[in-house]
Image (cartoon, rainbow, N blue to C red):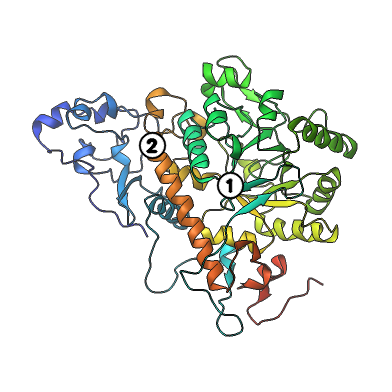
Amino acid sequence: MVTPSQDAPRNIEDSPENREKCLCSYCPSYPKNCGNKLLYCATGSSDCEIKVKGCICNTCPLFYQYHLSDNYYCGKERVGESGTFLRKPNKDEDPSFYNKMVEIKDKSHNISGISSMGSTKKLSFSWDDLHFLPAQIKRIPFNQEDPVDAKVTIGPKSQKPLKVSSPILISGMSFGAVSRNVRLVISRTAALMNIGFNTGEGGVLDEEKEIAPDEMIVQYSTGRFGLNQALLQSAAAVEIRFGQGAYPGKGSYLPAEKMTPKVAQIRGLEKGQAAYSPAHHPDISNPGELEEKVSELKKLTGGVPVGAKIGCGHVEEDVELLARAGVDFIALDGFGGGTGATTTYVRENMGLPIVAALPRAYQKLEELELRKEISLIAGGGLRTSSDFAKCLALGADAVYIGTAALIAINCQQYRVCYSGLCPTGVTTQHPQLVQQLDVEAGVENLKNFLVTSTEEMKNLTRMVGKSDVKLLDRSDLVGLTREISLITGAEWVNGQKLDNG
């Protein structure tokens, strides 16, 4: 997957004059014990791992002389079919994780990966343990030119259902956690493609309300940042946020370093003040109060879908309580979901993977005879079109993507979101770093990723012999391991259903 080519992005001469101008050795991220190399923008990346401590490329005379625009030339190389200039993999990084990032980058450039020979994936307890069953004789596969419907309706029984063009929705990523440019990219792409997007818990920019009002899912979080009656009444849907996959059962946190005057204004806080969200809603502590809140929001918003987002824990009990409270949709966020900042011990030890939680939620709604009335949205670590399609086959109506969308936009997974030093302009509020994300390019990249991924979902649907992604179900899947078949209810490779008893 990773095919580095020439590292240097420009034809910069490696000359004594240029070396004299070079500022690499003064940079806080400079690898001092790595051979004293200079002029990375000309000679290529360092052989050593680069620690993200700040970059001074844009203060170097060569940066302006050669019209450069990137940063961290010491730690990047060209990868993938698209030749994207991307950070090098870290020594302790899972190669499959990095390769999926490269795949997303390729799709953001309208390139769908083509591989030869067999798969080299390492099988584990994951979506990779499920395969689709191809239609052949019993059922006939559809041709490429045969139409496949990918349109989705969220909250079909609400007065004003949310209708979108694809089952891929953009999950909540708050302003402050991500930059203004990210929010503009997402809202513009949503309006352009009729894709649902979630505002996250940090309030809403005025531009977003103007750009994509028909696609905007307003998040009603425990912190209630930036929420008011006018905003709720402008929503295409409202999501009551109880938790998320990265830290279910714990309140969220935005470091003071990211609390710029604009972020503070939108959130109703003071500049430089860290933002904490409570672990639970102060006015929702029992089923009665939950039902009252759902009813209140439905009346206030004029009948748009009102749903809930939960981390995956006591799935059946939580789903039943939400269903009986009258929600129009339930968003399940599984273990592995992304976040800008949380503690490692929480992220690594709390919650269920979405592949395990989703079938249980679906089954509970079936038992309550409410499956056709309440939409299910699955999220948490989903990256590829096959992940998305498998979620639909296990009972989801739509999927939430967050990290995958950010990678398509410009993220390179430096994993320093909490620091405010994101080199790609994605999870920072630093003006110079935010400039690394060009809004127009971001819109084009995200659009390409969504178009390509939706088309690949359609192709998988054609291959199993169906004409609508909403018709995908468990009968289209086979489990490669006993464990995944038991967890999901998909038939095992021997053609039999496995009994949990």
Instruction: Specify the amino acid type for callout 2.
Output: Glu
| Residue 383 pos. (x, y %) | 52, 53
Q: How many callouts does the rendering have?
A: 2
Which of the numbered marks, if any, corresponds to residue 303?
A: none
If you read the primary sequence from the N terminus, does the residue marked by circle 2 or circle 1 appear first?
1
Out of 436 and 137, give the one closest to the viewer: 137
Residue 411 showing in the rendered view: no
SS for callout 1:
strand
Pointer 2 local density, CA inside 10 Å: few below 14, some 14–19, many at least 20: few
User: Considering the numbered disc 2 on the image, is that residue within a helix, a strand or a loop?
Assistant: helix
Spot occupied by residue 70 in the image (x, y as percentages of width and height): 30, 35
Residue annotated with mark 2? 440
Image location of residue 310, percent across then percent down: 72, 44
Residue for point 78% across, 36% down:
298
The vertical placement of 264 against 487, above or below, is above
Mark 1 belongs to which amino acid?
Leu
